[in-house]
Image (tube, rainbow, N blue to C red):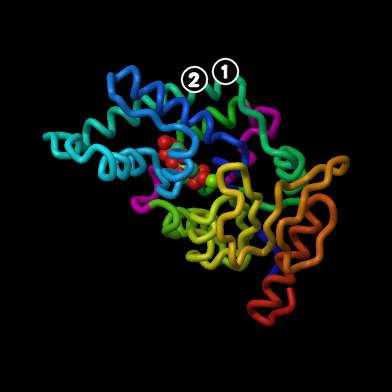
Amino acid sequence: MTLQAVIFDVDGTLADTEEAHRQAFNETFRAQGLPWEWDVPLYRELLAVTGGKERMHHYCERSHPAYLAQPGARDMISRLHEEKTRRYTQLVEGGGITARPGILRLLSELHAAGVRLAIATTTTRANVDALLATTLKTLPQGIFEVIGSGEDAAIKKPAPDIYLHVLDRLGLMADECLAIEDSRNGLRAAQGAGIPALITECRWTAGEDFDGAVAVLSDLGEPHCHHKVVRSALFNIGYIDAIVLRRWHTAWRFATRGLAS
Ligand code: XBP
Ligand code: MG
């Protein structure tokens, strides 16, 4: 079975967005008079928990348990998250976020080659739409056949739920697809759904345990600007295009299922 679809993660994969998320969280905390400040080292730690609401709840559990003890604390966190999302989408719409290397090129190539494209992300749909309307606006309308976002899966990555949701919407088997992710949580979510995953690590996830990834790269590269191979069990050239993805997918199936393509 050849490669039928590539499923892209969003934050850290399509674009390096987590600094904007961090800024939106901190602006919200300040606006609400909360003495919470997520600096870079703390945010890197908190990224182990996916989902903004879940991340704030986890932070309160470890640092401000009294906040959670208040009546309606869960609703208060939901309202904080709604404000954070408004602030984040404004930051994205301000145009300061660029696609990661190779993303616009590879998406266009895959689309032209007839490979179906989808998104499986933990972030909220509003954030995805803001990115599509700005950072990714040069891509053909509707290029992503399925968009699975934070609202579509009760349990977030590293649980496989969002990838299983996207597979179901695509009507494909896991081994007909390939996922592109930036984090260990994302890799585990794809693996949990039986989908091989290529990692393009970012500054927030570099050095995580990516055991089992098809390959670990610095990014997807460009013809004129090759990526750095962090680790690859398979052959590699200087940048990732549709041909390389198809070959890797076939090699992965052969290696894991002993099946020719
Ligand atoms: C990354 C996440 C998200 C973002 C914040 O999502 O875990 O929670 O950090 O966005 P992915 P929200 O890598 O799966 O795209 O506040 O909307 O959750
Ligand atoms: Mg990610």
Name the element at disc 2.
Answer: helix
Q: Is residue 205 above or below residue 245?
A: above
- Name the spot of residue 126 as percent of width and height, x first: 45, 31
Magenta stretch in the rendered image: 135-155
Instruction: Decide: few, some or many residues near mark 2? Use Cα within 10 Å; few <14, some 14-19, many ≥20.
Output: some
Q: Quadrant of the N terminus?
A: bottom right
Residue 99 visible, this orientation: yes
The majority secondary structure of the magenta stretch comes to loop
- Name the spot of residue 207 as percent of width and height, x first: 60, 54
- Name the spot of residue 45 as percent of width and height, x first: 44, 45
Q: Is residue 182 left or right of residue 219?
A: left
What residue is at 53 percent from the left and 65 percent from the top?
A: 191
What residue would you read off at disc 2? 90
From the viewer's side, name the closer residue of 125 and 88.
88
Q: Quadrant of residue 54?
A: top left
- Name the spot of residue 26 as percent of width and height, x first: 40, 26
Q: Is residue 95 above or below residue 201?
A: above
Q: Quadrant of residue 51?
A: top left
Return the residue found at the far right.
Answer: 224
Image marks 1 and 2: residues in contact by CB distance under 8 Å = yes
What residue would you read off at disc 1? 94
**Amino acid under disc 1:** Gly
Q: Residue 148 colored magenta?
A: yes
Q: Quadrant of the C terminus?
A: bottom right
From the viewer's side, name the closer residue of 164 and 159.
159
